Image (cartoon, rainbow, N blue to C red):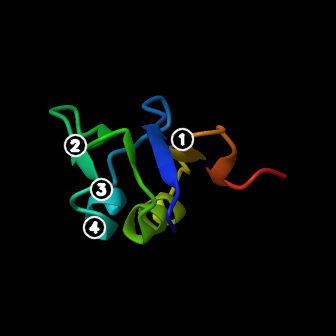
Amino acid sequence: MGDRWHVEVDRSLCIGSAQCLHHAPDGFRLDAARQSHPAAPDMGANERVLEAAESCPVEAIVITLGDGGEAVFPPEG
C-alpha cells in the first residue's frame, strides 16, 4: 500500500457510530455534533483507515486514490 489516499466523510450520511474511531483512532475525529471527519484528508494508504471505511454502518467514508481519483472504497461497480 504505497499509494496516497484522499479520505472524505459524507456528513449527510454519518450517524456518529464512532466505528471509524474504533478501527482507526489516529485517522478520524468526531466534532461536537458527533460527526466524523478525517484527521488529515490526504494521507498514505492505511489498512486501519480502510477497515474503518469498511466497518462504517452507513458507508459514509469514501477513499479515493490521491493521484487519479479512482475509488478505493467503496469499490466501483
Query: What is the CA distance from the residue labelled 1 to the residue labelled 3?
Result: 25 Å
Q: Amino acid at mark 1?
A: Gly
**Quadrant of residue 75 within the rendered picture:** bottom right
For mark 4, what is the residue? 22
State the residue in front, 15 or 25. Answer: 25
Q: Amino acid at mark 2?
A: Leu
Judged from the image, the secondary structure of the residue bearing numbered disc 1 is: loop
Q: Amino acid at mark 3?
A: Ala
For mark 2, what is the residue? 30
For mark 3, what is the residue? 18
Q: Is residue 46 left or right of residue 2?
A: left
Label located before the other in sequence (2 or 3): 3
Badge 3 vs badge 4, beta-carbon distance below 8 Å: yes
Q: Amino acid at mark 4?
A: His
State the residue in front, 13 or 51. Answer: 51
Q: Which mark is residue 66?
A: 1
| Residue name at image x 38 percent, y 69 percent | 48
Label located before the other in sequence (1 or 3): 3
Judged from the image, the secondary structure of the residue bearing numbered disc 2 is: strand
Q: Position of residue 45 (x, y in %)?
A: 46, 60
